[in-house]
Image (tube, rainbow, N blue to C red):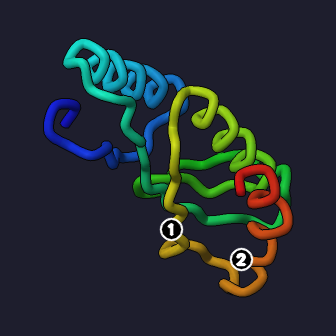
Amino acid sequence: MAENGDGWMTYPRDAASQGRAVADYRNRLKALGQPDKPVMQSLYVDLLEDPNAPARPIHLGFQSGSNFLHRYLAEIRELGMNHVALNLRFNQAAIEPTLKRLADTILPEFS
């Protein structure tokens, strides 16, 4: 990936594990004399109405309130993640209110 790819799209992991994976990728880029390349991950999210709801694992992501999601995204950004594709496939709430909560509480810091 580091030698031949234009970037890396990876699976979600807990923040510490993701940070190690991103650091390893960037170290490989450097060792190969490659320029820095973007890293992206997908993330299934079931966003709950209670912003303080704790995280609970779901397939390739988590169910949580917006506060946990915000902290997670901020942490992986600091660890080198460039892009995250939020997937609402498993979201149990109506999509329109969920998108509004994301737009109001998450996107302002990450846009």
Vertical placement of 90 versus 17: above or below?
A: below
Q: Which SS class for mark 2? A: helix
Vertical placement of 41 versus 18: above or below?
A: below
54 sits to left or right of 4? right
Which of the 4 image quarters holds residue 13?
Answer: top left
Q: Mark 1: give few (<14), some (14-19) or many (20+) Cα within 10 Å.
A: some
35 sits to left or right of 16? left
The number of discs equals 2
Depth check: 110 or 63 in front?
Answer: 110
Check disc 2 and report the residue beneath it.
Answer: 99
Q: CA distance from mark 1 to mark 2?
A: 11 Å
Q: Position of residue 83 (x, y in %)?
A: 51, 50
Check disc 1 and report the residue beneath it.
Answer: 87
55 sits to left or right of 66? left
Residue type (three-letter) at the residue carrying disc 1: Asn
Depth check: 9 or 48 in front?
Answer: 9
Vertical placement of 52 versus 92: above or below?
A: above
Q: Residue at x 57, y 62 (%)?
A: 45
Q: Residue at x 31, y 17 (%)?
A: 30
Q: Residue at x 71, y 52 (%)?
A: 110
Vertical placement of 58 versus 3: above or below?
A: below
Q: Residue at x 56, y 53 (%)?
A: 62
Which residue sits furthest left? Answer: 4
Q: Mark 2: give few (<14), some (14-19) or many (20+) Cα within 10 Å.
A: some
